[in-house]
Amino acid sequence: MTETVKQILDRFQSDPYMGRQGKVYTDTSDFMRITGGDVLVFGDGHYLVLRDEVERSYGVEDPKYWVKRCRHLESGERRLLKLVFYEKFKLQMGDIKITCYRSPRKEARILDLVRGDSRFMQGFSAEDEKGNTIRVLDVVMGKRLDNWIYGLDVDHKTYFFEHLPRILEKFIGACEAIAYLHANGEKHGDIRRDHLWRETHTGDYVWIDFDYTFDFHENPFGLDIFGLGGLLLYIVGKGFYSRSDIISLSGDENKTPDMEPGDFLLVFKNRLANLQKVFPYIPKELNWVLMHFSAGASVYYETVDEFVSDLRPCLKNMG
Amino acid sequence: METNKILVAIDGSENSKRAVEYVADIVKGCREFEVTLLHIERLPDRDIFPDEDAWKKACVAHRQKIDSFLSDNKQMIVDYGIPQKMVYTDYVESCHSPLAEEPSYCSRGTSIAQDILHVAEKEQFGTVVIGRRGVSKAEEFMFGSVSNKIIHSGKDCTIWVVQ
């Protein structure tokens, strides 16, 4: 006879659990039904679901019903469980529409590839009784890198000279981590500002969430390189700058530097790439790397190695 | 480089069919030209399928589609008056194919353009022909452009880009 949630919790927990006591699931196919107080049993573990994970963006909470915050009852440790959700959707990037796919198999494979590599979130995969590939992830204790940078309460010039060299050095390390994936025939698939975290204790940068994939034949790593470019732009600028932001920075529309379409990103046309125009102390070599992602570019990075090869001398020149 | 050898890169699209038609029309009736239709295999990404079996099925279907395209377009060239013995097809498998039988050369999947140019150089083709989709700068940045890469990287051969 299968155990109830109460029996499982009585067996594992020394402290009484005061929350909802739901159901025991060995089949996670219908993840919408699974919620706080349920227990998932698969592999060699029992996982008490605490709640659905939420993504917070611009003050809005977006629930991710296929991701559950859990407690692994055998160890008492917190875990994130990603359940199977085969999603296919069109991602709009500027004028381009890209078909993206969510792939549990891909993320499971990459977790195996990067095991023990602190540059990536850690975890493993296991199947439930229906063969669904569940990813069991360690929680990264830290903050999104972009939020951490935004929270540095200094003006841009101070940030650039006192903080950016160290940040850039670690960012280059994060890029090399992506190059490692590419060298092994894998891609991250979803490089964006909220998928690079800064671990609190070590200050190390950690990539998370690599379950997206896309099907580009000539430029298989194009979306990853584009993502790294966007991240670099945010890091160097301590944020993104639209046309109205540029006017605000100048304080006076008449003092705003002249801007051309080629000064802005190729894909997100309202985002300034030519940061040297508003921050003249940015060295031309570093600005040149940023300009590879601008509408004025005629040569693009095809590999992460090319990108990093141009970035390293910039770091050296920053002392 | 052999000036009478023409390599036409095809991907099964209407653009590449136009490229084949153009070549057939240019060299029609000329018995001394040798035309090779080349396909660099790009199978569907395995991760867009729920399991290996579904992926393998899709790979088989893709291969059948391209084989049929190669066969039909080879016949089209022959119908234009080029002798059958002067028309070839070449299929370069992906190194990551679940159907591969360890060919001597396979495509690693990082650049179709480089694979095409590798074949052109190795087999001494004098002319490389490719169809062009016509992509925006942003699309070229994101998705890449085989024709643009061939233009930039091709050497010791003539390149025809058919729009």
Image (tube, grey):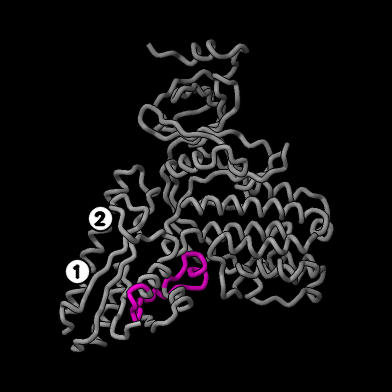
Q: Which mark is residue B61?
A: 2
Give the spatial CA distance, label 2 vs label 1: 15 Å
Segment tinted magenta in the rendering: B122-146
For the residue carrying disc 1, how many other residues have a C-alpha within 10 Å: few (<14), some (14-19), or many (20+)? some
Name the residue at 61% across, 34% down: A139
- Looking at the image, is mark 2 or mark 1 earlier in the sequence? 2
Mark 2 against mark 1, which lies toward the viewer? 1
Q: Is residue A173 above or below residue B125?
A: above
Instruction: Give, as a three-letter code, the residue at label 2.
Output: Ala
Q: Is residue A189 visible?
A: no
Residue B26 x %, y %: 26, 87
Name the residue at 46% across, 22% down: A44
Q: Is residue A21 visible?
A: yes
Look at the numbered disc 2 and give the secondary structure of its residue. helix
Residue A168 located left or right of residue A118:
right
Whether residue A140 is in magenta: the answer is no
Quadrant of residue A76 within the rendered picture: top right
Look at the numbered disc 1 and give the secondary structure of its residue. helix
Whether residue B140 is in magenta: the answer is yes
Q: Both on one chain, marks 2 and 1?
A: yes
Question: Which image quadrant: the C terminus of chain A?
Answer: bottom right
Residue A225 located left or right of residue A253:
left
Question: Which image quadrant: the N terminus of chain A?
Answer: top left
